[in-house]
Amino acid sequence: MDRLLAHPEALLLASRASRPFISGLLEKVLDDLRRDFMAPSRQEFSEEEVTELVLQRLKIAYSKGLEPSLRRVINATGVVLHTNLGRAPLSSAALERVVEVARNYSNLEYVLEEGTRGRRDQHISGLLNQLLGCEQSIVVNNNAAALFLILNTLAGSGEVLISRGELIEIGDSFRIPEILEKSGAVLREVGTTNRTHLEDYRRAFNERARLVLRVHPSNFRVVGFASRPNLDELLKLCRELSIPLVEDLGSGCMADLAPFGIADEPTVRRSLEIGVPIVCFSGDKLLGGPQAGIVAGQAEWVGKMRSNPLYRALRVDKLTLAALEGTLLSYLVRPETPEVPAFRMIQLTSESIHRRSEAILAQLTNSHPGLDTCLVDGHSMIGGGSTPEHGLPTCLISLRSSSKSASEIERKLRNFNPPILTRIEKDCVLIDLRTVFPEEEPVLVKALLNL
């Protein structure tokens, strides 16, 4: 080990990083090499050859060791809000706000007009209140945290009434009943999986009931012989019982999606306008901003949550606030068609995607004799636990090779720099340009030419 660390090439690497870093890499290289030498098919090496082999592997380990693990990828899957790929990409306006705030000091908790200490949520609450028409709002680190804070604050150890059909799993094995339990609240199920009536809530109500929780089924739909009270009916009952109604809207839709054939995704503002006291939703789904959980509604209830010590533990940092502010300003300027990438992708027509796809195929003409390329009709998905029943008509680039399997093509694209993520259907690799930014198309063409 000492002789290897004293080698000029190892010393050069250590001068660029640090001796402990190089030592750690070298230990791993030697461990791997020992295992190789123990294999039945082992070869005989001289000391000089072993040294050369170790140094080669050390250089490779050094390069990989300094590579960021969190990397940019090109999303050619057609899933707009792909949870595994970071959900909503940020707008230029949001990125500009992040860079400005990150690069400099900011008035995060300072009131410039008065020269006094302020609250960090002052930068967002005014915007949210204006956009949503609510009295008060706060932001925490995700929607699960928002729901947890609501339940812990308003329910305590009391009961929360919720329909059995709304006891959903929100992803990564997190379930509404478990969030309820951890918050200290007691779950009181009403109705059945497919049908819940207003009287089910009324019969379940007792002196320990603290609130009614309504969860929007953003990541699934129950169809057929199914029903639940509408929002107006449930709100009227809650007023009669003198307990608040909390609506978890999940995806956080801010603009009407009906023009794109999606009529059953409720907007946050509508729920607040008809009188729902408290709503919560995500920032990085249909809103198109950073990961965040937003609570909005009546000051009486939201104010209590802000006073809960848990709020400080769940609050967001300055970069999230900056990105969220930039996103919300886009809605303020153009509420129906905000300059938000996820929303723009949803708006794209199949015809416009077809034209872009044709232009890419034209650049691949005769590039690979064994590669069969064509355009096929298909559907993109909004994803991110949103609008599960609705696909967006699109045009797909289909790839099939006589010499490579679909899995091999997919793997080669996935290992390109930057990685390109696609999908496989019926032994074909499919590329959906809905989720590929126009400026990424030259990189995609380069990768396809190198298959």
Image (spheres, grey):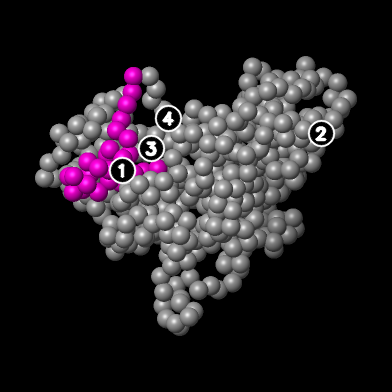
Tag of residue 216:
3
- Residue 384 placed where, x, y %? 50, 38
Identify residue for label 4: 220
Amino acid type shown at disc 1: Ile
Whether residue 51 can be seen here = no
Q: Are marks 4 and 2 in contact (CB under 8 Å)?
A: no
The quarter of the displayed image where residue 213 is located:
top left
Q: Nearer the viewer, residue 355 or 285?
A: 355
Q: Is residue 67 magenta?
A: no
Q: Residues within 10 Å of mark 3 (few under 14, many from 20)?
A: some
Amino acid type shown at disc 3: His
Q: Is residue 244 magenta?
A: yes
Q: Are marks 1 and 4 in contact (CB under 8 Å)?
A: no
Q: Earlier in the sequence, mark 1 or mark 4?
A: 1
Q: Furthest residue to the left?
A: 207
What is the distance, in whole Å, between disc 1 and disc 2 at their CAs? 49 Å
Amino acid type shown at disc 2: Ala
Of circles 1 and 2, which is in front?
A: 2
Number of numbered labels in the structure image: 4
Identify residue for label 2: 359
Of circles 2 and 3, which is in front?
A: 3
Q: Residues within 10 Å of mark 4 (few under 14, many from 20)?
A: some
The quarter of the displayed image where residue 225 is located:
top left
What is the distance, in whole Å, between disc 4 and disc 2 at their CAs? 36 Å
Q: Earlier in the sequence, mark 4 or mark 2?
A: 4
The range drawn in magenta is 225-249
* Badge 4 element: loop
Q: Residues within 10 Å of mark 1 (few under 14, many from 20)?
A: some
